[in-house]
Image (cartoon, rainbow, N blue to C red):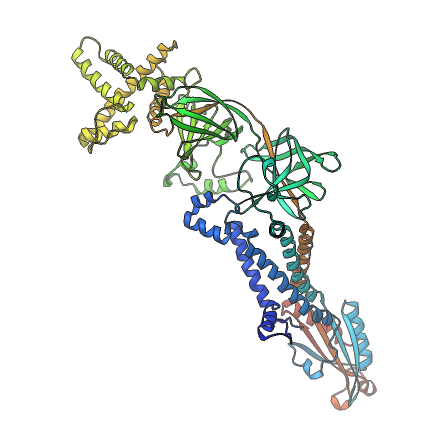
Amino acid sequence: MTVSTQGMKVNWGSRSLRASVELLSSMRFSISLLTVICIASIIGTVLKQAEPLVNYVNQFGPFWAQVFSLLSLNTVYSAWWFLLILAFLVVSTSLCIARNAPKIFADLNQLKENVREQSLKAFGHRAEAALPESPEIAARRIGQTLVQSGWKVKLQQRQTPGGNGWMVAAKKGAANKLGYIAAHSAIVLVCIGGLLDGDMIVRAQMWLHGKSTYTGGGLIADVPAQHRLSDSNPTFRANLLVAEGTQSGTAILNQPGGVLLQELPFSIELKKFIVEYYSTGMPKLFASDIIIHDKETGEQIPARVEVNHPANHRGIEIYQSSFDDGGSSVTLKAIPMAAASKPFEIQGTIGGTSQLTNGQGEGAEKLTLEYTALRVINVENFATGGSMDSGADVRKVDLHQAIDTRLGAANKTVTQKELRNVGPSVSYKLRDSAGQAREFHNYMLPVKTDQNENTPAVYLLGVRETPSAPFQYLRIPVDPEGSMETFLRLRAALANPAQRELAVRRYASLAIGRDRPELAQQLAASASRALALFAGSAADATPGGVKSTAGLQAISDFMEANVPEAERSRAGEVLVRILNGVLFELAQMTREQAGLKPLGQDDKTLGFMSQMVLSLSDAHFYPAPMAFELKDFTQVQASVFQVARAPGKTIVYLGCAFLILGVFAMLYVRERRVWVWLAPRSLAQGAPVEGASVTESAGSSQATMALSTNRKTMDGDKEFEMLKTKLLQAPL
């Protein structure tokens, strides 16, 4: 039987209705729908789903973000057009099955024993032989042989001019056609399961019961009833965040344009959240010890939820989705980055905000400090070399070494890693009165980024303008007391002209002495000029009337504007040497004023001051009047659960089983049919059979054999040769 791609032919209704029924029930229409669903699924896999609109704007631009929103490509699997295509696919495939299934089941029992003798000669696999047995004896022997080999056999006696002839019809591999029904039924079952577990029923409740999405903020308890779904909702998949020591029984369903609140027949209390890490810093284990509080019976059921090990209560699966901060409290210390700022401490809660004022009087700037994240563990790779190299040195190319680095143990990698936990960090945003915000990421502990013992550890203060940009870090060296106070004092002294002038005189007197006052005066003038440029207090202007910047960039701009190009290299070295010397004296002054020991004259101090100069230069470009250092914290973990009532899950599993069986049946089960026509053989038909008498030859038969298979394969050729030898040979 050949499965037709045409649809149902109906004899009632208008012409357009008949054409619609034929198209809807045709296999070509089902394949077209399945192709569209596959393309949509590819889009849903490549494009991140259910992200905030601003993420798409940052990544693709406002035009494509608007296109994705209009076509619901950012929520493909819950889009109305995707659900509609699924529904049409269910109907179309069901009609295809209903149209072809009766024919398939009828064909299972048909051995087609009425085939004509002349038709057997048209088959590709055919053979003829003379047998010493009578047609009836040969037919029964051949039929018995086929039955023993697992064939379904039927014998048919026919009247011929030469006597009674026998047709042996056999069939094997009927499960191939059942594979067609199983595979197509699997498509229907999977689509039905997808419709049941998708947003179709939630959308129906919104249409029929007047439910709408909620777009505001505030407490969950204050959300009106029209934005809530009852705990009898037959299908949903929502998220539930529970902090340690608290419980919640209302989950959140994300919808395009807002959220819906899903009431649960129980509440979940999080006793303890457990997270373990690999050496790479990646989480190894999420686990939540919870207590399920049944709202109807008041029963308290302890349970443990891990990734891939959900808990179940009242038909609702509780999955461990991820974890978050549950409202950790942090203590931050403000680090002044501008002369008008003063140090202070402030306490806050992750997820909360604090109001700040920068400056005094009516012109004071209002800032909002938003506490966004606390990370207790930060594992970074401090390996050197490898990716830092820019090109290959042909003198160092070693083929044996290159092969050896890629073969061997599974943990061998080309790029070596040096993983180190650098301690806690805090992330926050500073938002101005216009609503513009920058994101900051500061580490609590100093980090040593170099193996050189003379390189100081540094505090890392990160900042970025947009979420898609990487963090850029200001590196502040740690002083001998293990803090950044030397940096802060030196930065404040740079902003004080009197302190700068005192440091310049001190440097000039130490460098020249008092016996050459005219040379000391010239050195002091150069040092004062360099220090003023570095501090951003120079009165000079660059060509074009634009005031010079601060830091090393200001010195570079001054050199380009005032020194001939041929002399810049030597003059720059002298100016930078003078600047380093003055800054060192300024640092010594600030330490003396603070009652601290002066810095020693050694390589460690040289490394410290080298990094200090870079830090002071970069600090002028820090885009905030203050940075916040993490001084203390109390971590509170929160667990994110996915709660789901999925009646379609069992249907989908059944569909997957059907699909596996169907595909295996269609690919690995071959339908074969064998016919053997046995006709009486008379003397007039030819010479007697070898080894038989004339009487025996008169009772012999002429056999015509043919084999039909749904796929032409080498196995089919071998099977035909085996059957021909087995069936058409004379019995011993």
Q: Is residue 395 above or below residue 187?
A: above
- The quarter of the rendered structure image containing the C terminus is bottom right
Q: Nearer the viewer, residue 87 or 713?
A: 87
Who's the residue at 45% across and 52% down the image? 67
Q: Is residue 604 visible?
A: no
In which quarter of the view is residue 355 placed?
top left
Decide which of 397, 303 is in the foreground and name it: 303
Quadrant of the image containing the N terminus: bottom right
- Residue most toward the left? 518
- Number of disc labels: 0
Q: Residue 535 falls in which quadrant of the image? A: top left
Q: Position of residue 502 (x, y in %)?
A: 27, 13
> Which residue is found at the position 24% from the left and 26% from the top?
572
Which of the two residues, 629 or 686, is positioned nearer the viewer here?
629
Residue 192: image x %, image y %? Answer: 65, 56
Position above or below: 382 against 532: below
Vertical comparison of 27 with 322: above or below: below
Residue 143: image x %, image y %? 79, 74
Q: Position of residue 694 (x, y in %)?
A: 81, 88
- Left or right of 697: which side holds 317? left
Of 187 and 109, the residue lying toward us: 187
Asked if 712 appears above or below 343 in the picture, the reply is below
Left or right of 350 in this view: 496: left
Kindly tell me whether residue 412 is visible in this rendering. Answer: yes
